[in-house]
Amino acid sequence: MKCEICEIKEPLYTCKMCGRRVCDDDYDKITGYCLVCKDAICKICNRYLSIGVCKYCGRLGCERCLIQVSPIEYTCVDCRRKGLK
């Protein structure tokens, strides 16, 4: 079995978010996430995978941290609190 990201090295770790088996190069030991999940994680709460980007601050956000303001636009809870709608 090979790393599910690079498909070259042997997997040493399992991502705690998605369950991918990954090598040392594709794993963040601090977060316990593979690099794919680390790049896609909500930048507001750091707990869930993101679904979109806040139209004001540009941060990735999850379903709990983003408010859909149109079929294609989201505002994060922080920007909403600041009065940006």
Image (spheres, rainbow, N blue to C red):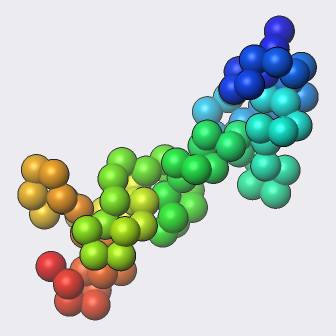
Where in the figure is residue 39, as x and y percent of width and height?
Answer: 58, 50
Q: Is residue 3 above or below residue 47?
A: above
State which quadrant residue 14 falls in.
top right
Q: Quadrant of the C terminus?
A: bottom left
Where in the figure is residue 16, as x and y percent of width and height?
Answer: 70, 39
- Residue under the point 75% across and 17% down: 7
Single out the residue that lies furthest toward the left.
70
Q: How many marks?
A: 0
Q: Quadrant of the N terminus?
A: top right
Q: Nearer the viewer, residue 5 or 82?
A: 5
Q: Nearer the viewer, residue 39 or 16?
A: 39
State which quadrant residue 24 falls in.
top right
Whether residue 53 sits left or right of residue 10 in the image: it is left
Q: Does the image show residue 77?
A: no
Whether residue 63 sits left or right of residue 49 in the image: it is left
Q: Is residue 73 above or below residue 58?
A: above
Q: Does the image show residue 80?
A: yes
- Residue under the point 79% across and 49% down: 28
